[in-house]
Image (cartoon, rainbow, N blue to C red):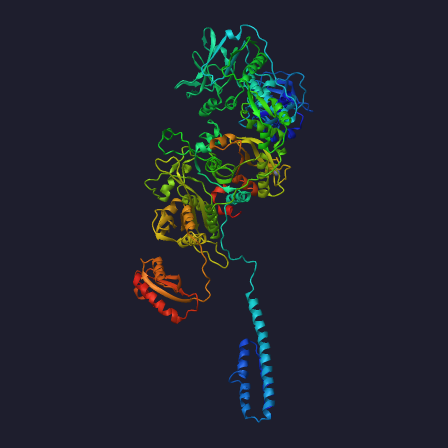
């Protein structure tokens, strides 16, 4: 037996051991057994020192070949074993992907404020700023400056909430207060016009109050969005075009808009605005009461008397104003049958939008 | 305003189908709210002929009849009426018919005999007239024909929404004029003068008006020798079509004329009016101090001094424009009628009718404004009709006191200006053609128009009113759409408004749903919350609240959120996370309007999530609320903030804190106190917080955000557990660590708090009594190299020694 034969025998034995290894641990044991510091192949190679100069190149070549073969076998076996191990781990880790995911709660914006924000966004894009005003108003701002005659029925105690006036003047003592909960966002128009010269382009969202008993179609408190434009050369056509743009943005490009002449004390000419029913498209169905149209807002050209109260030159400037109810629009958009849902805070309602 | 199309057709040619007419009215400003088809209510009522009438064998007051209704077999009907005989034609309600009063006719046994229907009186059919017996129809009434058809009840009634500026449309003639103008046809104004005889009215009646402001015109006519009784069918039917129950022929004529022409009338029993100088003396004057009147509904009405009274020398006889007086009411015994057609001050009528809660068709018209020119014409026509339906003779002439007579108003209409306002390019002629059919006098003056306004259009007072008429008759749909050019405007939200948007977005990202509650509050919430107002604070009180629970304005959002949590709990939803951003109100002596403050509040109850297959539900507590505020302050950059333990009576002591920004208390946070939970029918814990939004805005506006280098070298972390007295707060230890940390200490993170559980036996205690252990992870870092233990250890040891000295801590072994 030459040393070369020994090497070849060892190679065969080692390759068999590698092949026999069933796990990565057994494979590692085999590696250490042959190629480790105390491994059998290492021992053989260590014995090369005793060879003759003739033998050394031949044995050296063979031993290199053996070592490379063994390392190659180890590597490919490791790769195979690792592949198997990963595959079985993957198999073990498989889940039922239809099980529910872990849930991080994210809150919802109230649907009314979603609607208000949408309206505000649309008008912001048209160059409107957002104005606000007090919710507890004076009769002057809520009615008088908005051209309501002194005996206008809306002023009556059965329609408008009045607030106790603690200023100590006589009216308060008599209980005929001129302090009230605003019945519309329109008084903010007057505040804006008092504070600012034209051009004025504002949108006013906010809460308003009327003495209605809460039922499916009334609430004593609701949410209004008001718009006001005062500038040179503003026409009724501008009002119409603006609202047509708004309705298409808000309800979709295929909805139609119509303006019907109406009466409001603080605008003239005035109109009510209808949008074509989204369900029947205008032919009439149950949700639009057979009319094909749904009333969504009121509007008009600012009445010269209103300009008179705030000292705006009616010959130089014209303007328009419009107002809509967020509850009405949300109700139409989402088919909410009872306005009281908006104010109860039931999370099962809030989570729908 | 209810408009019978059958009646309207007498006044104007209706050239459009009903649906198109409605559209046309809608689009010109007279909204059609509903369309009623009359006669439907009388389905199943037919004309019948009584064949036989026999005495009911077992009932004295009943008869047993055989009635032909054109069917194969006559009906057998038991009847209680007595005013008929065999051969009479009567309305018969067959089995299954439902009468206007709601009664459904059924097959029924009456004293042993089956009745297969019912013969009807005028009252039962609500067609006007006598209810004391059957309605006997003329001999030529065709048997078997539906009664509604035969009686002419089939009609279409439009319910019009008449806006307050259009009093003229509260009459058939006004509506006819409007229909004519918008459908381009002519209309007819009914007129007529009575045949007169006998003593002139001027010798019978005198009229005096004390205040021409309150009563611009008063006319009186006299009709003598009338017979008060049921109205003829045509009259009853028309009055009923307008929605008024027929009363008697005289009253029905006054109502008829009111609906036809728009002039409310009042008929007095002339015999009951007191005389002066041998004339029935009418004096129109304001009510005196403390004066009362008994109105014809039998009520004594106390009057304010601006109420207008019709009086005679004996005292008040009618509340002008609102309701007649009891003493002068027309009754069956009345023979002489004094007919009033007048005009009263709209504001006064409005105040009086609202104050007394007496809102009538008459007051509604007067408060909107009745054309004073109309009175005499209306009186003429009414006198003629009364004589026609109630007999009697009309005294010659009319007493007419007209202090408020005014020449017709002229308004200029600038063609150019009109087009500028509307965005149209109409010519002068086009505008003129739009306005003239409304009854306006239109004359060209230069490039523009001069418009004469008739008295029936009191709403046309200014040029802009005419511009509106041009717009609506031209058609808003024909005005070209455009959008404002508007140079130099700026859109979008202000910084404070953008901040509010961010607050909401952050709270939602933190898991809270937005709630909107009532701004109304309940004074009892002060008690429920055990909330003490500051001595200079008062709640904002409503003078006319809808209910006790909504009688003030809220001064905190807390009850709104607690109620919403409670609402959810009652409906079986246990995990509730809500926030609300809204105004709170507080006032003080000397203030007219309250202070309004924008607050943001949150409520957390239950767990973030329902338990899942792979996670457990964790009960939310104080620290979840605090975590939400931490997120809020960090994300919105609302400045350096801190909390300080501080009891609020509605929060649980030891689990409540004040929120402090820049040294100011800007809000509070804590778990709701058990007694408050009881008051809102809740089980805890419920975490609540409330913070002033403007305070956050202010803090955020002071804060400037600037870039810091991202570290390139790793940090060196060392942990330490410090044992301190319970009274030493985590914040104090953290602050001591930070302040003593020097340049290398980058962050201090509290990762554990340990206390021996309550009741741990002495031998097993790991900490001395009254002490707790706070475990911190300290990270050291420098910007230009990786730190080694040799760099950090000496710094760390020195820091710990210093902190131990400062807060009385010992390092836990
Ligand atoms: Zn529809």
Place of residue A146 in the rendered image (x, y in percent of width and height, measured from the top left): 48, 32
Q: Could one spot residue B155 in this view of the protein?
A: no
Place of residue A203 in the rendered image (x, y in percent of width and height, measured from the top left): 51, 40
- Residue at horizontal 34 percent and vertical 50 percent from the top: B646
Please identify the quarter of the rendering in which residue A66 is found.
bottom right
In the rendered view, would you say A181 is above or below B632?
A: above
Place of residue B307 in the rendered image (x, y in percent of width and height, measured from the top left): 44, 20
Tell me if B646 is positioned left or right of A95 in this view: left
Please identify the quarter of the rendering in which residue B780 is found.
bottom left
Ligand 1 shows up in which quadrant of the image? top right
Q: Could one spot residue A316 in this view of the protein?
A: yes
For the N terminus of chain A, the quadrant is bottom right
Circle count: 0
- Looking at this view, is A303 or A207 the one in front? A303
- Residue at horizontal 54 percent and vertical 57 percent from the top: A100
| Farthest residue, direction front | B446
- Residue at horizontal 53 percent and vertical 85 percent from the top: A39
């Amino acid at each position: 037996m030459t040393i070369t034969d020994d090497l070849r025998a060892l190679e065969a034995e080692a390759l068999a051991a590698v092949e026999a290894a069933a796990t990565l641990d057994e494979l590692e044991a085999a590696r250490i057994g042959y190629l480790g510091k105390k491994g059998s192949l290492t021992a053989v190679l260590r014995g090369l020192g005793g060879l003759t100069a003739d033998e050394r190149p031949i044995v050296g070549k063979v031993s290199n070949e053996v070592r490379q073969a063994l390392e190659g076998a180890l590597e490919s076996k490791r790769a195979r074993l690792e592949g198997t191990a990963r595959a079985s781990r993957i198999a073990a880790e498989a889940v039922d992907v239809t099980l529910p995911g872990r849930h991080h709660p994210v809150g919802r914006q109230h649907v009314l404020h979603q609607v208000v924000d949408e309206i505000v966004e649309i008008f912001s894009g048209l160059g409107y700023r957002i104005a606000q005003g007090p919710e507890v108003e004076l009769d002057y701002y809520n009615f008088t400056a908005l051209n309501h005659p002194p005996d206008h029925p809306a002023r009556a105690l059965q329609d408008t909430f009045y607030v106790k006036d603690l200023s100590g003047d006589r009216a308060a003592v008599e209980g005929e207060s001129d302090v009230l909960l605003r019945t519309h966002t329109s008084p903010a128009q007057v505040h804006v016009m008092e504070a600012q010269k034209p051009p004025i382009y504002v949108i006013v969202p906010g809460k308003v109050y009327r003495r209605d008993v809460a039922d499916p179609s009334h609430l004593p408190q609701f949410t209004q969005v008001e718009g006001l434009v005062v500038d040179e050369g503003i026409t009724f056509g501008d009002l119409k075009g603006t609202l047509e743009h708004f309705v298409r943005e808000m309800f979709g490009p295929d909805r139609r808009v119509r303006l019907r002449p109406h009466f409001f004390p603080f605008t003239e000419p005035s109109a009510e605005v209808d949008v074509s029913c989204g369900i029947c498209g205008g032919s009439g169905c149950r949700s639009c009461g057979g009319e094909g149209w749904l009333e969504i807002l009121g509007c008009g050209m600012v009445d010269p008397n209103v300009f008179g109260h705030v000292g705006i030159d009616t010959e130089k400037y014209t303007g328009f104003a419009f107002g809509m109810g967020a509850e009405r629009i949300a109700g139409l958009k989402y088919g909410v049958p009872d306005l009281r849902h908006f104010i109860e805070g039931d999370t099962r309602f809030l989570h729908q939008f | 305003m209810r408009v019978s199309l059958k009646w309207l057709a007498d006044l104007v040619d209706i050239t459009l189908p009903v649906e198109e007419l409605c559209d046309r009215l809608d689009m010109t400003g007279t909204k059609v709210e509903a369309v009623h088809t009359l006669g439907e209510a009388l389905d199943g009522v037919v004309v019948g002929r009584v064949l036989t009438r026999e005495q009911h064998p077992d009932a004295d007051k009943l008869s047993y009849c055989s009635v032909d209704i054109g069917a194969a077999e006559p009906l057998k009907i038991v009847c209680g009426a007595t005013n008929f005989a065999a051969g009479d034609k009567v309305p018969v309600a067959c089995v299954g018919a439902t009468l206007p009063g709601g009664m459904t006719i059924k097959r029924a046994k009456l004293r042993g005999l089956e009745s297969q229907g019912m013969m009807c009186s005028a009252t039962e059919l609500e067609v006007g007239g006598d209810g004391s017996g059957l309605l006997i129809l003329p001999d030529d009434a065709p048997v078997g024909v539906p009664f509604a058809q035969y009686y002419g009840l089939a009609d279409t009634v439009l319910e019009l929404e008449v806006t307050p500026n259009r009093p003229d449309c509260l009459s058939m003639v006004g509506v006819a004029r409007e229909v004519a103008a918008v459908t381009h046809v002519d209309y007819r104004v009914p007129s007529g003068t009575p045949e007169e005889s006998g003593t002139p009215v001027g010798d019978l009646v005198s009229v005096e008006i004390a205040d021409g402001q309150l009563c611009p015109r008063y006319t009186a006519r006299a009709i003598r020798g009338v017979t008060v009784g049921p109205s003829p069918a045509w009259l009853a039917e028309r009055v009923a079509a307008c929605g008024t129950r027929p009363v008697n022929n005289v009253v029905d004529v006054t109502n008829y004329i009111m609906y036809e022409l728009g002039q409310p009338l009042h008929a007095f029993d002339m015999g009951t009016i007191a005389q002066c100088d041998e004339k029935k003396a009418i004096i129109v004057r304001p009510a005196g101090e403390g004066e009362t009147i008994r109105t014809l509904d039998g009520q004594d009405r106390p009057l304010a001094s601006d109420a207008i009274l019709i009086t005679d020398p004996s005292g008040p006889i009618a509340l002008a424009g609102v309701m007649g007086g009891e003493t002068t009411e027309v009754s069956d015994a009345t023979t002489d009628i004094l007919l009033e057609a007048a005009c009263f001050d709209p504001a006064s009528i409005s105040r009086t009718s609202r104050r007394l809660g007496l809102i009538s068709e008459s007051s509604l018209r007067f408060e909107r404004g009745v054309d004073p020119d109309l009175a005499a014409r209306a009186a003429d026509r009414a006198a003629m009709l009364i004589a026609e339906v109630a007999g009697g003779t009309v005294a010659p002439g009319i007493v007419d006191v007209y202090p408020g007579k005014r020449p017709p108003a002229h308004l200029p209409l600038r063609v150019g200006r009109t087009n500028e306002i509307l965005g149209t390019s109409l010519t002068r002629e086009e505008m003129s053609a739009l306005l003239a059919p409304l009854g306006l006098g239109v004359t060209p003056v230069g490039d523009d128009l001069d418009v004469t306004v008739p008295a029936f259009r009191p709403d046309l007072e200014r040029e802009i009113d005419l511009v509106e008429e041009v717009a609506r008759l031209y058609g808003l749909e024909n005005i070209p759409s455009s959008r404002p050019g508007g140079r130099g405007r700026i859109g979008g939200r202000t910084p404070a408004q953008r901040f509010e948007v961010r607050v909401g977005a952050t709270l939602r990202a933190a898991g809270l749903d937005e709630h909107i509650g009532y701004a109304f509050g309940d004074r009892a919430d002060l008690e429920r919350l055990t909330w003490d107002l500051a001595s200079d604070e008062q709640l904002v009180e409503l003078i006319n609240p809808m209910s006790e629970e909504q009688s003030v304005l809220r001064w905190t959002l807390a009850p709104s959120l607690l109620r919403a949590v409670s609402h959810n709990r009652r409906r079986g939803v246990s995990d509730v996370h809500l926030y609300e951003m809204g105004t709170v109100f507080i006032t003080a002596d000397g203030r007219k309007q309250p202070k309004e403050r924008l607050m943001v509040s949150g409520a957390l109850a239950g767990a973030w999530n329902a338990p899942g297959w792979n996670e457990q539900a964790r009960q939310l507590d104080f620290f979840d609320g605090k975590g939400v505020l931490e997120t809020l302050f960090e994300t919105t950059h609302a400045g350096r903030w801190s909390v300080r333990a501080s009891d609020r009576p509605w929060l649980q002591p030891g689990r409540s804190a004040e929120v402090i920004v820049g040294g100011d208390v800007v809000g509070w946070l804590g778990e709701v106190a058990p007694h408050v939970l009881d008051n809102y029918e809740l089980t805890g814990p419920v975490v609540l917080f409330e913070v002033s939004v403007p305070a956050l805005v202010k803090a955020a506006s002071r804060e400037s955000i600037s870039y810091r280098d991202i570290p390139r070298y790793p940090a060196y972390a060392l942990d330490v557990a410090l044992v301190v007295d319970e009274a030493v707060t985590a914040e104090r230890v953290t602050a001591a660590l930070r302040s003593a940390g020097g340049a290398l200490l980058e962050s201090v993170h509290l990762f554990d708090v340990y206390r021996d559980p309550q009741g741990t036996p002495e031998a097993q205690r790991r900490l001395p009594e009254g002490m707790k252990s706070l475990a911190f992870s300290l990270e050291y870092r420098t910007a230009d190299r990786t730190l080694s233990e040799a760099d950090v250890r000496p710094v760390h040891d020195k820091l710990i020694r210093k902190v131990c000295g400062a807060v009385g801590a010992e390092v836990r072994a």
